Image (cartoon, helix red, strand yellow):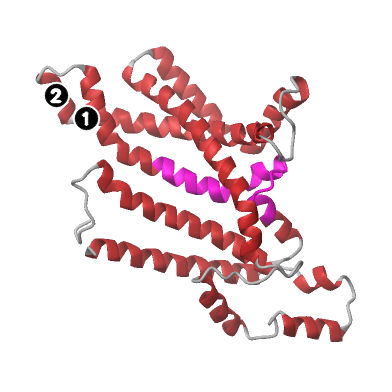
Amino acid sequence: MPFGLLKKAGLLLLFLWAAGSLIFFLVQAVPGDPLLSILGQNPRSADILRLQDSLKLNLPLATRYVHFMQRMFVLDFGESLIDRKPVLTSILKYLPNTLCLTLAAIMISILIAFPLAVMAVLKKSKFWEGLALIFSAIGLAVPIFLLGILLTIVFSVEWKLFPISGSGSAKFLVLPALTLGISLSAFLTRMIRAVLSKELQQPYVLLARAKGLSNARIYRLHVFKNAAIPIVTIIGLQLGALLSGAIIVESIFSWPGLGTLLITAIRQRDFPMIQGTVLFMAVSYLILNFLIDLSYPFFNPRIGHDPAK
């Protein structure tokens, strides 16, 4: 295995350890007693001691940290304090809904952002440039929760095209996916436009034109190919961010995903569920970034996983 690939894998493990440690200690600092969520208010001392012993909450913090880190690397996030089911089971139950929402939002954002950015850069028209700038500025300025409320008012309250909240069919996915997709497309439009503009200013474009190549061939054979890596990186990072950052949208539309699971766990002071869900999101983000890094040689064979990289 190339040294560069081993180095990247080692960094991935280091980041996983750092993320797990940070999540563990932050959750321990959250105010509130999780036992009160289970036993109710004013529980008996004997019940508290018995439950503490059962849940291993009476162990020293350092011991619990070591146990947590050992279980983390085998994807054992413990049991929920509320229903005593494995945390991973609950995560896997809600994960498909979050994946559906994330993939739908990414597709919507690409379908909006890529044509708009390409038209703004390649057409060199004030109309397309102005449209791209205005769309990006408004999309980045409007908070995602406000965008969700506006879409709900238009498509659910006024036009009655889609349900406001819940799940069960593709109709329930439309509004949350549109909310995430439109918000993300504003950022992607700006970034893709910047990447393409930079590539068009490179000397190889001038050389290709001097050789008599048409603009269509230059764009297809050179510009889009060289811009593929930064664009894929941007989209991949946003995909990871959506996997871990759809909490607000899922809450607005009552979409049963990981965000809803996390919010419920925070309300119930279910510390193992909070740790497991946040850690799963962090691990997914890190692994996705690692896979994107490994995909670079596919777009540019000159990039390898050697020590110099």
What amino acid is found at the position of numbered circle 1 in the picture?
His
Q: Residue 16: where, in percent of width, then height?
A: 46, 66
Q: Does the magenta portion include 285?
A: no
- Asked if the residues shown at circle 2 and circle 1 are in contact, with their CB atoms under 8 angstroms apart, the answer is yes
Q: Is residue 283 above or below residue 106?
A: below
Image quadrant of residue 268?
Answer: bottom right
Indicate the secondary structure of the residue bearing disc 2: helix
Which residue is rendered at x = 72% and y = 66% of the image?
A: 270
Q: Is residue 124 visible?
A: yes
What amino acid is found at the position of numbered circle 2 in the picture?
Ala
Image quadrant of residue 84?
Answer: bottom right
Indicate the secondary structure of the residue bearing disc 1: helix
Q: Is residue 30 visible?
A: no
Crowding at dot 1, Cα within 10 Å, few <14 / some 14-19 / many 20+, comes out as some
Q: Is residue 46 above or below residue 169?
A: below
The majority secondary structure of the magenta stretch comes to helix
Determine which residue is flagged by label 1.
222
Q: Residue 238: where, in percent of width, then height?
A: 47, 43
Determine which residue is flagged by label 2.
208
Q: For the magenta stretch, what is the residue range?
A: 234-261
